[in-house]
């Protein structure tokens, strides 16, 4: 290859590099965006500063370097056949200096994208041209709202409040978004063609054929081993569909189960939060616009067995499980919104350790909803444990707290009949997502925020964030994923020190004496508030990431005093001797995250908590978080 051909190839490759790899349009530029000419750099072009120095030293303000360069550029333009007949451009361009040694070619009106592409290719083929790129008009770096009709109800996807603390304090609670994970802002970093189809395994009640999840799930397996609980007439099989988890009997195999005549469709709700189709003029938007769900059914009626969950964890990551085929679609992110209140246990810990060490997968687990210590598997080692926050950034009334990785919004109850004195004032009613319209068996696609409250729904927001991180940088290790979530998290919100008439802070730090809505610290709610935008910045440069200087949001609680006369904190203190039940179940708001429930556990928990946690809001026991 001669020098001129090699130079042309180099210039052409520089021109096409970024977009061609992912089959995006040349310049990665929307077809409707105006292209205000081209920016061209000739090979060995003199610096503008050098030309100006020559002009300053010359009596006639001339520069030999500048004139030679201009002649070279005009020759290149002529030889590239820059005229209306040859390439249909508006006019011969005007030339002006830009940058350190480049030139802008401007026409009498903006070019179309097609014109810019054709002209740029002609110029890039010239041996004298080092590179050429469009002089596009840039947009504000602001994500536009997707066209999903229910997006307005998805407050948890919206941008963070950017006003001062005083200005945000003056807003109604519904407009306060200091606890949100910034997904809409994160989409400005990875969206559309930039998104790699990462996989998230959702270990839950299975999946339904929902219109807003069409094409968003792949493969899957049913690990529910007990036929009576499975609801589909058999044990483990290759069909991950959710037949419904309603319970209409508490006798026989269902002794100790919670009576519930309606199915929760918990797995479909989780999948919708992560992966609902976005910009499809339908329903809701998902937090990740390009990932795939691997549905792993581990829960049926009465919850989930520990053995089924542990096998589901292994299978999801691609490890061998006895009497099951190898997963052809292994996931690096495994979302678990079921669990129990016992210590971690060997079976859980073994599965978690194996998938992390052998595949690099991470397990994301809901902390639980008993407003006490985190439950398993969130209390296991090497797990990303997730707590739930209010939209304003303090702990949600139900959320467990303690040794967690990070926290994010999970919905907060807005009713007055359930636990929490501040529900009606601070509640948001839940997260809007996909569901099924059937009462017991699947009937059709639907949407809801009812009962979508709990650490069950905080965990998938973290899983979605990790999947976005991996879509930007698939080489991230499990340790880097955890480090990135922590390093990028925003500081926990603080509260102005306003007191009631006993000199006790109205909203104090989270503790067993103050377990409801409370002020988080790094020892009770993890490293901070999940920040998807900053997590993606970390993913792009994990070794060089530096978090921006940020101060905690200071929440003024004067509204609370006016609304509740400073008469009581949100929840009374936790019982001194909290029972430690052993089953495993879903972590939706009223699920206690365990396995198949036993009567002794149920009675003990009811006695300890005044039955607050067992007022079911559509989230299955076993318990869903």
Image: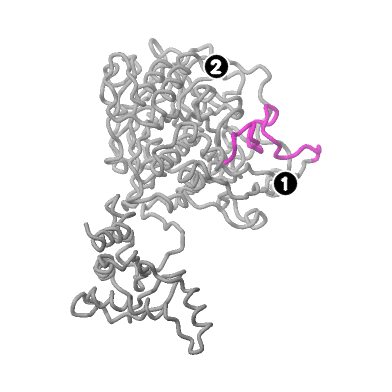
Q: Which mark is residue 496?
A: 1
Furthest toward the top, the residue is 252
Furthest toward the left, the residue is 85
**In the rendered view, would you say 465 is above or below 325?**
below
Which portion, as a residue range, is magenta? 501-529
Q: Residue at x 42, y 80 (%)?
A: 64
Q: Which mark is nearer the camera, 2 or 1?
A: 2
Q: Main secondary structure of the magenta part?
A: loop
Question: Would residue 141 be seen by someone viewing this image from the given angle?
Answer: yes
Q: Quadrant of residue 440?
A: top left
Residue 508 colored in magenta in the image: yes
Residue 177 colored in magenta in the image: no
Q: Which residue is mark 2?
A: 343
**Nearer the N terminus, badge 2 or badge 1?**
2
From the top left corner, tell me how far across and down residue 583 is, in percent.
48, 16
Report, in whole angstroms, how far the alpha carbon at label 2 lies from the one at label 1.
36 Å
Q: Which mark is residue 14?
A: none
Neighbour tally class for label 2: few under 14, some 14-19, many 20 plus, Cα within 10 Å: some
Q: Nearer the viewer, residue 467 or 335?
A: 467
Q: Is residue 406 left or right of residue 281?
A: right
Neighbour tally class for label 1: few under 14, some 14-19, many 20 plus, Cα within 10 Å: some
Q: Nearer the viewer, residue 184 or 226?
A: 184
From the top left corner, tell me how far across and down residue 364 is, in percent.
47, 30
Q: Is residue 384 left or right of residue 214?
A: right
SS at badge 2 = loop
Question: Would residue 299 be seen by someone viewing this image from the given angle?
Answer: no
SS at badge 1 = loop
Q: Is residue 415 left or right of residue 245?
A: right
Tell whether label 1 touches label 2 (CB within 8 Å). Answer: no
């Amino acid at each position: 290859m001669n020098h001129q051909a090699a130079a042309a190839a180099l210039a052409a490759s520089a021109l096409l590099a970024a977009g061609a790899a992912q089959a995006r349009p040349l310049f990665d530029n929307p077809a409707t965006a105006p292209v205000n000419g081209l920016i061209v750099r000739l090979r060995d072009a003199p610096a503008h500063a050098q030309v100006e120095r020559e002009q300053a030293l010359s009596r006639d303000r001339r520069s030999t370097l500048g004139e030679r360069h201009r002649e070279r550029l005009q020759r290149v333009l002529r030889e590239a056949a820059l005229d209306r007949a040859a390439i249909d451009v508006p006019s011969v361009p005007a030339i002006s200096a830009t940058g350190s040694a480049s030139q802008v070619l401007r026409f009498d009106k903006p070019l179309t994208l097609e014109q810019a592409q054709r002209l740029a290719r002609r110029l890039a083929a010239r041996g004298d041209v080092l590179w050429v790129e469009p002089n596009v008009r840039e947009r504000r770096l602001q994500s536009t709202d997707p066209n999903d009709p229910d997006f307005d109800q998805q407050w948890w996807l919206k941008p963070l409040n950017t006003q001062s603390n005083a200005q945000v304090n003056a807003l109604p609670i519904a407009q306060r978004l200091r606890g949100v994970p910034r997904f809409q802002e994160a989409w400005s970093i990875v969206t559309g063609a930039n998104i790699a189809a990462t996989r998230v395994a959702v270990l839950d009640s299975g999946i339904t054929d929902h219109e807003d999840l069409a094409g968003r799930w792949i493969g899957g397996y049913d690990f529910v081993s007990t036929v009576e609980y499975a609801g589909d007439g058999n044990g483990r099989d290759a069909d991950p569909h959710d037949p419904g988890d309603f319970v209409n009997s508490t006798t026989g195999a269902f002794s100790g189960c919670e009576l519930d005549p309606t199915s929760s469709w918990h797995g479909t709700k989780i999948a919708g939060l992560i992966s609902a189709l976005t910009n499809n003029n339908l329903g809701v938007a998902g937090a990740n616009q390009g990932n795939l769900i691997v549905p792993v059914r581990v829960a049926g009626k009465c919850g989930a067995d520990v053995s089924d969950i542990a096998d589901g964890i292994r299978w999801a990551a691609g490890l061998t499980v006895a009497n099951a085929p190898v997963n052809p679609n292994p996931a690096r992110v495994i979302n678990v919104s079921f669990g129990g209140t016992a210590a971690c246990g060997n079976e859980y810990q073994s599965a978690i350790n194996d998938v992390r060490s052998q595949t690099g997968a991470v397990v994301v687990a809901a902390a639980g909803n008993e407003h006490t210590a985190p439950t398993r598997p969130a209390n296991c080692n090497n797990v990303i444990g997730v707590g739930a926050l209010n939209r304003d950034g303090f702990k949600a009334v139900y959320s467990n707290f303690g040794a967690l990785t990070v926290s994010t919004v999970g919905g907060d109850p807005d009713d007055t009949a359930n636990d929490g004195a501040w529900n009606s004032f601070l509640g948001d009613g839940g997260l809007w997502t996909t569901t099924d319209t059937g009462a017991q068996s699947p009937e059709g696609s639907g949407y809801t925020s009812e009962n979508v409250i709990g650490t069950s729904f905080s965990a998938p927001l973290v899983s979605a964030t990790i999947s976005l991180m991996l879509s930007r940088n698939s080489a991230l290790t499990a340790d880097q994923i955890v480090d990135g979530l922590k390093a990028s998290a925003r500081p926990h919100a603080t509260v102005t020190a306003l007191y009631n008439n006993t000199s006790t802070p109205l909203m104090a730090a989270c503790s067993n004496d103050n377990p409801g809505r409370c002020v988080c610290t790094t020892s009770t709610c993890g490293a901070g508030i999940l920040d998807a935008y900053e997590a993606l910045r970390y993913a792009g440069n994990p070794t060089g990431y530096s978090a921006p200087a940020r101060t905690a949001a200071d929440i003024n609680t004067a509204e609370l005093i006016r609304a509740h006369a400073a008469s009581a904190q949100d929840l009374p203190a936790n019982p001194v001797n909290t029972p430690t039940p052993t089953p495993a179940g879903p972590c939706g708001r009223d699920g206690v995250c365990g396995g198949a429930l036993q009567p002794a556990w149920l009675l003990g928990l009811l006695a300890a908590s005044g039955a607050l946690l067992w007022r079911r809001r559509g989230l299955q026991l076993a318990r869903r978080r």
